[in-house]
Image: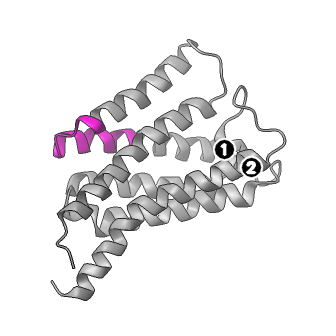
Amino acid sequence: MGKSDLRKDKIFVILGIIGPLIAYTCIGLSIYLSPSFSWRVNALSDLGHAKNSIVAPIFNFGLLVSGFLVALYSAKSLAGYAKYTSVSLTLSALMLQAVAAFDEIYGQIHFIVSVIFFILAGISCIIYSLEKKSILAALAFAVGFLSWALWWAGVYKMGIAVPETISALAVTSCIIHSAIKIIGRQPKD
């Protein structure tokens, strides 16, 4: 592998860190700029509603770019490190893009792609925990699953944005951790 190949590989690996950071930056900015968002009643996707949200372009742009960058990371870099996880994570990243493309204005379609995104994200943690014997990935799945189960059971009364955020942060910890692991395996220049 030549130096230019190593540079390309490093760029793709770094996308596994940059992609999620872009999503959270845009989500955070959207929450900050949205006069009506409330953790007690809203879904994160309410920020992306094309008609009802003044921050929809910021929110949806963040999801689209993040999904694209994580899909690139997964297909080009993670595939060589955890090939089964990379398939699931690539599909999950594409569904994240679908969440932005089919915002809440699309009703049932948005709901379906959102559910598929969160299911695939959780499955990615399970696969990674088995494939790489990762305790972090198993814990990430457990935290994400518990956040949804407790919300559905009515144990805590908050908007759906809360389990969305908890489960997304748990999955993101695995993505970033895997990228750091891959960086650690690469030869130094």
Provide the secondary structure element on which disc 2 rests.
loop
Residue at image location 34% in from the left, 46% down from the top = 174
Identify the residue under disc 2.
49
Residue at image location 23% in from the left, 39% down from the top = 129
Mark-to-mark CA distance, 2 and 1: 7 Å
Q: What's the mark number on residue 128?
A: none
Quarter occupied by residue 122: top left
Q: Measured along the vertical axis of the image, is residue 39 above or below residue 131?
A: above
Q: Main secondary structure of the magenta part?
A: helix
Q: Can residue 106 be seen in this view?
A: no
Q: Give the range drawn in magenta.
A: 121-136
Residue 181 lies in magenta, yes or no? no
Q: In this view, does 130 lie to the left or right of 65?
A: left
Residue 107, image x and y in percent? 69, 44
Q: Which amino acid does label 2 sit on?
A: His
Residue 70, image x and y in percent? 42, 61
Residue 93, image x and y in percent? 44, 56
Residue 55, image x and y in percent? 77, 54
Residue at image location 22% in from the left, 53% down from the top = 84
Residue 125 lies in magenta, yes or no? yes
Q: In this view, does 169 lie to the left or right of 52?
A: left
Q: Which amino acid does label 1 sit on?
A: Ser
